[in-house]
């Protein structure tokens, strides 16, 4: 088993509470998630509270979007922690932490995904250059989050 962690960061010219609200409500992710564009017909199911701890989002999409779910397991003004489960194209369970640091004129946001991979997962991760691909996805998502938050 091998542990991995990917972190990307972005400064956003918006108050921490405004940025936090866009992450704390999975319905708001449609406006900024980098994966929405993979399948415009992706099916979304939301259960639990509208936002915060216990909010749950499941999706089913085409081959690229796959199938999985996310649940907010902790939410404070400083960070939101999410349990992420992929079912397709390959099963995986990872932890996501999106942290918010107030700065002069806005918020620094850090998006981290971490987990443990078995041998097969590590081979897939290496061959498919997943770190590079996920880093690009996170950068794209953070740029979209920045645009949405700064437009409000």
Image: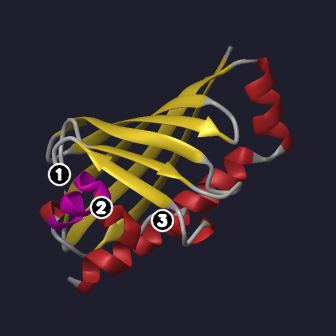
Residue drawn at x 19%, y 37% as measured from the top left: 53
- The CA span between labels 1 and 2 is 8 Å
| Left or right, 4 with reference to 74 | right
> Magenta stretch?
18-26
In this view, the residue in front, 101 or 133, is 133
Quadrant in the rendering for residue 80: top left
Residue 88 coordinates in the image, percent (x, y): 65, 40
24 inside magenta stretch: yes
For label 2, the SS is helix
94 inside magenta stretch: no
Residue 26 coordinates in the image, percent (x, y): 31, 55
Residue 106 coordinates in the image, percent (x, y): 21, 70
Question: Magenta: predominant secondary structure element?
Answer: helix
> Is 14 above or below relative to 72?
below
Asked if labels 2 and 1 touch by Cβ distance under 8 angstroms, the answer is yes
Residue carrying label 1: 50
Residue drawn at x 48%, y 50% as measured from the top left: 59
For label 3, the SS is helix
Tally the marks.
3
- The CA span between labels 3 and 1 is 21 Å
| Left or right, 100 with reference to 116 | left
| Left or right, 16 with reference to 34 | left
Residue carrying label 2: 27
Quadrant in the rendering for residue 76: top left
Q: Residues within 10 Å of mark 1 (few under 14, many from 20)?
A: some
Residue drawn at x 29%, y 61% as measured from the top left: 27
Residue drawn at x 68%, y 14% as measured from the top left: 1
Residue carrying label 3: 141
Quadrant in the rendering for residue 143: bottom left
For label 1, the SS is loop
Looking at the image, tell me whether mark 3 or mark 1 is earlier in sequence order.
Answer: 1
Disc 3 versus disc 1: nearer the observer: 1
């Amino acid at each position: 088993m091998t542990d991995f962690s990917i972190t990307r960061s972005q400064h956003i010219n918006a108050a921490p509470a405004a940025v936090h609200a866009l992450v704390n409500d999975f319905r708001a992710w449609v406006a900024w998630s980098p994966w929405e564009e993979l399948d415009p017909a992706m099916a979304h199911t939301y259960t639990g509270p509208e936002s915060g701890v216990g909010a749950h989002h499941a999706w089913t999409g085409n081959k690229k979007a796959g199938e999985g779910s996310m649940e907010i397991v902790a939410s404070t003004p400083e960070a939101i922690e999410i349990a992420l489960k992929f079912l397709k194209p390959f099963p995986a369970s990872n932890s996501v932490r999106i942290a918010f640091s107030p700065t002069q004129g806005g918020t620094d946001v850090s998006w981290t995904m971490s987990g443990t991979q078995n041998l097969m997962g590590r081979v897939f991760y290496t061959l498919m250059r997943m770190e590079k691909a996920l880093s690009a996805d996170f950068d794209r998502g953070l740029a979209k989050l920045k645009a949405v938050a700064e437009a409000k």
